[in-house]
């Protein structure tokens, strides 16, 4: 199924079906994001930014939220 076909199907959903689909899709995207972050962590892609954040915190260059 193409993206265009998916768009057409979604555009024809009734309001209650669209709400169910939207909740499902939000959860799907959140799971995708979680998997990507986990892969980035395991690959070491966040090591340097994490070290910079630690340095900023330890040197007092952070403020409370």
Image (cartoon, grey):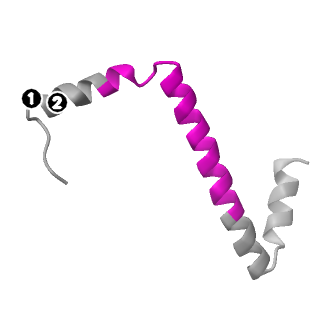
Image mark for residue 22: none
Q: Residues within 10 Å of mark 2 (few under 14, many from 20)?
A: few
Q: Residue furthest bottom?
A: 15
Q: Quadrant of the C terminus?
A: bottom left
Q: 37 or 11: which is nearer to us? A: 37
Identify the residue at horizontal 16%, vertical 34% (top origin).
57
Q: Quadrant of residue 15?
A: bottom right
In-image side of 54 versus 13 (left or right):
left
Mark 1–mark 2 distance (CA, rounded to whole Å): 5 Å
Q: Is residue 24 above or below residue 52?
A: below
Q: Residue furthest left?
A: 60
Confirm whether the magenta stretch covers residue 31.
Answer: yes
Q: Position of residue 17 (x, y in %)?
A: 79, 75
Q: Is residue 33 above or below residue 55?
A: below
Image mark for residue 56: 2
Identify the residue at horizontal 71%, vertical 62% (top origin).
24
Confirm whether the magenta stretch covers residue 17.
Answer: no
Q: 17 or 4: which is nearer to us? A: 17
Q: Position of residue 23 (x, y in %)?
A: 66, 66
Task: For mark 1, give the secondary structure.
Answer: loop
In-image side of 54 versus 60 (left or right):
right
Task: For mark 2, give the secondary structure.
Answer: helix
Q: Which residue is mark 1?
A: 59
Q: Are marks 1 and 2 in contact (CB under 8 Å)?
A: yes
Q: Is residue 11 above or below residue 47?
A: below
Tell me the chief SS of the magenta region: helix
Q: Which residues are magenta?
A: 24-50
Q: Position of residue 13 (x, y in %)?
A: 82, 74
Q: Position of residue 54 (x, y in %)?
A: 22, 28
């Amino acid at each position: 199924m193409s993206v265009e076909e998916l768009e057409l199907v979604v555009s024809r959903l009734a309001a209650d079906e669209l709400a169910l689909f939207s909740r499902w899709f939000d959860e799907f995207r959140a799971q995708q994001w979680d998997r990507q972050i986990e892969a980035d962590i395991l690959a070491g892609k966040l090591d340097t930014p994490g070290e910079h954040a630690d340095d900023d915190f330890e040197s007092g260059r952070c403020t409370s939220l």
